[in-house]
Structure formats: C-alpha cells, structure tokens
Amino acid sequence: MDAAIRGALARRQSDEELLTALEALSRRPLFRAFTWLWGPALNAKDRVRFRPFILSCFSPSGINAQGTWMHGWGGENLAALEQWLWDADRADDVEVFRRLFAWRLSTLRGKHLDATWRAEVLMRAQAARTRAARHIALAKVDVGLGRMDEPTALALDALDPEVARSFILEHLPWRWQNTREPMWDTLRERAQARGDAALASAVYRRLVDEDTWRQDVLALASTLRDPATLVRELEAHHPESLVPNAAQVFVELAEARGRDVVPYLLGHLRAVFPRQGMVRRKNAKGFPELLALARVRGWEDVWSALLRTSATAETYDAEVRRLLNDTDAEEGVTRRHLLQLAGAGGEANFLSWGVTWVQPLTDATAVALYAHFPELLRGPFRMHVASGWHSAYPKLVTRALEANDEDLLDFIASRAAMHVPSFGTAREWARVLDALSTHYEALPKEGGAFARRAANALGALPAYAIGAMPVLLEKNRLARLFFLRSDDFYLAEPRAVRDLLEAPQIHVQALAFRLLGRNSARARELAARNRDLLQATLLRPLHRRTRHAAFGALANAAAHDVETARALLPRVRDAFALPDTRYPKESLVDLLAQMLARWPELRMPTEIPTVFGPSAEGDRT
C-alpha cells in the first residue's frame, strides 16, 4: 500500500486520473491508515478538488511501510502535515481543520492536552475581531479532546457571552461519583446576574455534588409554597450525573411536601437504580422506604413506576405475589394494581435499534398469575414471561398446554424457538422444547392448522434476535421443526406464507424466500400472489445469500404469468442503478435473463438479440 500510494502520487497524470487511481486504492484494506502520506500531498496539489475524497477517507490512525502501527502525526511528513493544518486554518475550512487539530492534539496526554487545548481556545477567541470570526474560531477548536475549566469559561464569557454560551455548554465537564470537580460558582453567579437561567442551571446540574444538591432541594421544599414553582425549581436543580442516594432524598422531599413533589418524582424515578452486591443485585439505599411511603399514602402512580423502573427483579416478583395472595382485596382492585405494574421499565434507542428492559416474573409467580388472571398473562404481562437465560418457564408451559391456550403457547414458542440452551438452565429448556415440539408436531396438517400456528410463532420473533443460526438449528428442536421440517405445510397455507414474508426477523423472511423459490407450481403461484412484498427486496439491504433466495422467489413469481412479469421487470431494471458495490449485479442479470427468456414479448428493443448468419461468400464456399 505504501508503494502503491507513493507511485500514484509520483506518476505524471492529471488530477482526474490521480483521483481515479486513489479511489481504486481506497477500496483496498489499510488505505485510510496512510492518510499521513496521501493527505498532505493532495492538499498541496489542489485542496478544493480533493476535499470530498479527503473527508471520506480521512483517518488519524497510522501505519508505516513495515506494517507497524504508529501515530500518524509525525515522522517524515510532520512538516507537510503542519502545512496542511495551516492551509486549512487560513482558508477557514472548519471541518478539515477540526480533524487535523484533533489529530495533532491526540499526541498529547492528560494535563498537557487540556492546557494546550485551553490555550488554543483562548488565543483564537481573543484574536477574532468580529462576532462572526469568533464563531468560526470556536468552531475550529470544537473537538472532543481537552477539558474546559472555569477560568477559560470566564474568559470566553467576558469576551462575548452570546458566542461563548453554546461553546461552554457543549464543553461543560461531568462530575462523576467520588470525583472532586469543583462547582463553577463564579460563572453561575454571573449568569444568574444577567438573567441567563439556562446557563446557570446547566452548570449547576452538571457539577453539583450529592450533599449540596440534597441541601438545596430541601431548602426549596421549605421555602417555595406554590407546587408548580417548586416542581419547576426541582427540575432545574436535578443533577445530570448519577446520584447513588437519590431515593433517600426523594423520601425526604415526599415527607416534607407530600403530593406536591409527585410530578417531579415521576420524571426522575430512573435515578433510583439497584446496586450490585457481592452475589446479586440489591435495591438502592432508600428504595424500601420510598416504596413503603408510596404504598401507605396511596400514591399508586409512584408505587407502580418505582417497581417497574427501579426495583430488583426479586422485589418486583414479590410485589406481584403479594397482590395475588391478598385474599381480602376485591378482584377489581387487584386487577387494577396488576395492570399498573405491567409494562416496560425503560428503554434506550439508538440509530437503528433499541433496548427495552422489563422486570421478569419467576415461573411460580407466572403460574399463580395465570391461574387468577389468565387474560392478563396473555396480554399486558406477556412480556414479563418472555423466556430467556433467566428461566424457561416449564411450569407455565405445562399449564398452557393443559388449557390449550393457543395465543400464549405461540408467544412462548416464539421465544423458545430463538433460544440456544445453555449451562444452568439446559435441563429446563430441554423439557420446554420437547413439550412444545410435541405439541406443534401433533397439530393437524390438513386445513393449515399447523402452518398458521407455526407462522404465528415465527411472526412474533423480534428483529435481530437470532445470532448464530447453524448453532440454533443444531441445539433447538423447535427451531428445526419451524425452519427445516415444515416447508410443504407452509406452502399449503397462503396466509402462513404471507405472514412469514411480513415477519420482522430476517431469518423468517429468508425461510419464506426459500419456500417461494422452490421448483413447483404451488411455489410459483404463491410467489406471484406476493409480488408486492417480493419486489421490495430488490431495493432492501440484504445479506448476499438472502438476496439470492429472494431472487429465486422473484424468478418464480415472474415465471407464473406474464402480467406478474410485466409488473416486476421495471423494478428489476431500476435495481441496476443502485450504487451499492456489493450488490450482486451478476445475479440480477441472470434474473432479468430468466424473465425475458420466459416472456420474449416483454423485451425492450435493446434486449432483443441480433443473430448474424454466414456471409454470402461463406455460403458459396
């Protein structure tokens, strides 16, 4: 790679030819690790022309010709890198400068890095003569390295409060547990004096320690009489960092002001979280007192939210058992309390996926709930008995089989079919998988009963829930039944096949593609019926093997009748314009060829082959 890059840079060629050569090299491994080599050279040739390529391939990690990883800022190209940084600074190219500046800063560590960054921030802000120039200057040094301190923040605020405000908020330090980050009292007081409550609150919430926060909120509870004002001020003072003893402070607030503080508590109960003990998790300090206070005062909203979000699984399970065992309570009251406990305790969402945490019930509690309120277990409490590493729920499965509860069994089967039995619960899982497999194998195959039930279970599989499919099929009897041993039964039931196509789990969709790609009249008929779902696979991101299976289903759909082929052909032709370099265009060509060979009347003029016969002289000879 080193030799190839140096050769491309040294060759006499136009900028367009150089860019083409480098784009070809960028598709090979380790090209980005040579940014220290090709980056300064491209900047020197034409900073503007090569800028998009530089930004798309930029990487601060470095490697040399011997294959040794190194810090890219330094060595033979240090002067060229410094020149590149200076050129970006002079041109006010914020994005390029920011990357290069962070690269150079990363050569430093600890206090030296912080001091260098702060000095650069102040120097650039003070050198700027206009507000627009200060915005650009601070944007250049807005990198993820370096820690802001109060003297630097005060200097920026004195220079231009309007410009400095967003920069300071972006770089406020975090106060972690047991750290000694001091409160920025001077900046906070200055912000309060000019009426900037948002900045003052942000500084306070980020840097306040637990003892100070407790004293302040208790003082607010004793002085502010209006409930709305109290809640607003409590929100403005709530720490952004973790507070291990938040439950104890919440108890003191509730005892001091009663129901007035409930809106604030409901918004911050997730600040109360279990702590890790020597063997298992324990409830947070103050949690039992807060739970008891909410129960005694009849604050059902606080009581239920606290159990869902902040209790250990053992405490949550015990509370459900207490409700079920309370024979003195009316059935309607018990049902209402149980409904308040059902549901997710929290969630975290990322770019394309999310995580939800739910309190699980034990097998015994699940059986008791099923005996008293079966509709609750089938409905809102279903997520609380989702089997996994913690339990396989063998007793609940037995009760559901005895009652022939199809809805509950299909849900349990959906979770069981994606689980690989592991050490610790392997015996429980063996019982559950054998029982469920026997149940589904005994379902009537005629009339589509088995296919519909199996499709219901597979359709309830969550997306991304299956990892190693070969391992699952090897160790899970129920998964083998659903994915490998039932193809003919699915094809006999059109609704089941469509349910498989619409399932969120990609392995279930791949099963449907495989079924519809089989060489049979039935598969071709069903593929044509589901052309609306199959044509979408042409544009979806799919694994190569899954895409080939989808192509087989599309070929079957097009082979069924000319109208289906006529509707699919434009979509197939459009797929050739996709920019994805990993898209199997050669397989797409094969799919198009199969469709045109089956229906020649659908060929475009450019797709009609020209056959050249022998010449006249050839005939005579």
Image (spheres, rainbow, N blue to C red):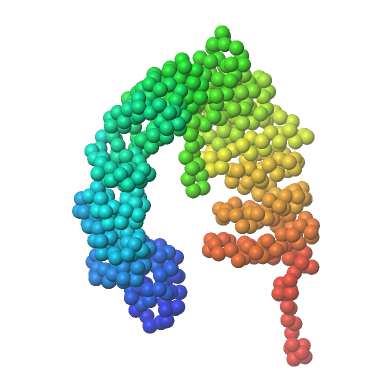
Pick the residue in front: 334 or 372: 334
Indicate the position of residue 353 as horizontal and vertical percent values: 51, 44
Residue at (36%, 67%) from the top-left corner?
Answer: 93
Q: Tell me the quarter of the image containing the N terminus.
A: bottom left
Which residue does the image show at 42% across and 64% down from the upper left?
56
The reply to whether residue 494 is visible in this rendering is yes
Q: Residue furthest top?
A: 328
Say whether residue 402 is left or right of residue 315. Answer: right
Does residue 181 appear to the left or right of 348 in the view shown? left
Q: Is 4 displayed left or right of 373 in the figure? A: left
Q: Residue at x 57, y 24 (%)?
A: 339
- Using the image as rendered, state which of residue 464 and residue 397 is in the foreground: 464
Please tell me whether residue 363 is drawn above or below residue 28 in the rendered image: above
Quarter occupied by the C terminus: bottom right
The answer to which image quadrant residue 469 occupies is: top right
- Which residue is drawn at the image coordinates 58% and 61% (left, top)? 584
Q: Is residue 286 above or below residue 110?
A: above
* Image coords of residue 572 (percent x, y): 67, 62
Q: Is residue 142 depicted above or below 505 in this figure?
A: below
Could you say where residue 16 lies in the image, as x and y percent from the top left? 45, 78
Q: Is residue 436 visible?
A: no
Foreground of the two, 435 or 201: 201
- Residue 196 horizontal/vertical position (percent): 35, 46
How many numbered circles does the render carry? Answer: 0
